[in-house]
Image (spheres, coloured by chain):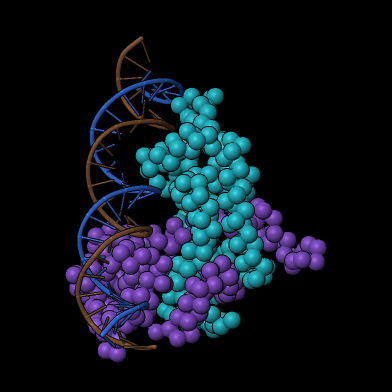
Chain colours: A purple, B cyan, C brown, D blue
Amino acid sequence: MSAVGGAAQGGESLLFLTDEQLRKGIEAMFFAYRGFTADPDRILENHAYGRAHHRAIHFINRQPGLTVNTLLSVLGVTKQSLNRVLRTLVEDGLVESRVGRRDKRERHLFLTEKGAALERELSDAQRARMRAAYRAAGPAAVAGFRQVLEAMMDPDLRRFYQMMRDGGA
Amino acid sequence: MSAVGGAAQGGESLLFLTDEQLRKGIEAMFFAYRGFTADPDRILENHAYGRAHHRAIHFINRQPGLTVNTLLSVLGVTKQSLNRVLRTLVEDGLVESRVGRRDKRERHLFLTEKGAALERELSDAQRARMRAAYRAAGPAAVAGFRQVLEAMMDPDLRRFYQMMRDGGA
DNA sequence: GATTTTATGTCAGCCTTGTTGACTTTCCAA
DNA sequence: TTGGAAAGTCAACAAGGCTGACATAAAATC
């Protein structure tokens, strides 16, 4: 692997990063993300749902009882956009929306058994690809993968991500 | 980093991959991709273009003279979808479409000076984030990052990606 | 030379998923 | 008790996917 040379370049950096190397990283993200979403997308077609539903289901599963507002921040969409998705999921009996006990304005979101079943179907497929990639690349590569991705996140999202890591289900 | 334990698990695998670790990888992809597209998205807003235009511009820059059909395969969209984007780029004088010399059915795509200028603006921003992430994570992490992403791609796209790596501009 | 296939472009219409803006209801907290 | 936050809803719109149908030119094949 000659993706990154170790040569020091001036005093500023420890890495010798050519534009070409950076461009390859950009393309790797693009192509890998396509693969990343391909399997769930195929499953969602059969259920007449889209990626937006998948994302909502994923995070509701991760943090059962999270509020709509929290989910809004995590997903980075408007409440109108999320509401459309959430409404169909509630109507179809995949998600339950419970009024908050302490603050009754808030709605706490939970997967029903039916919702959990779809979540499993989706994440089984996505994890299978992830597992295969991890195995092909090896443990050291996986650690690096996670480090770079974390460094690419916006700070707010990184905090979210790390909270989920530490506290996660 | 305790993201991945090195313990051998039976004879089947070298990695001990819990569901939790895989889920964290999935979330890392999701949040990192948001960051990955954030800077170009902001720039594109000012020019009244979208991500679809960015993708076309990126690959035309990478492989000047590529045909419409090739670009179609790389992007994985329908010709109608691509055509809409390409038409506006040609009309606005960012992309030039030249009839093929050997095969006159083909159109070869090139960036004009104006197109190259926008490409630079977009990729400068994206590379800056990439560079920062690479520096924060270090050379070993970068190699691992690329390995895992490559392993996540669909085989067809992986071939494309590797071709661009070897032959690339 | 006639026919078929390929590459491209285009029109029309549809869907998902994002957006903004306006408005209502609920209800916590100062 | 009132201001403002949380949530929901309606309407309208845009980007960017999709399918299907059709046109044209040129290459390839029979």
Residue at 64% over, 44% down: B169
Q: Position of residue A25 (x, y in %)?
A: 59, 58
- Quarter of the figure with the C terminus of chain A: bottom left
Q: How many marks?
A: 0
Residue at 48% over, 82% down: A163
Q: Nearer the viewer, residue A18 or B36?
A: B36
Q: Position of residue D25 (x, y in %)?
A: 42, 20
Q: Is residue A23 left or right of residue A161?
A: right
Q: Is residue B151 above or below residue B27?
A: above
Q: Is residue B52 above or below residue B29?
A: above
Q: Is residue A65 above or below residue A54?
A: below
Q: Quadrant of residue C4?
A: top left
Residue at 69% over, 55% down: A18
Q: Quadrant of residue A81?
A: bottom left
Residue at 37% over, 79% down: A62
- Quarter of the figure with the N terminus of chain A: bottom right
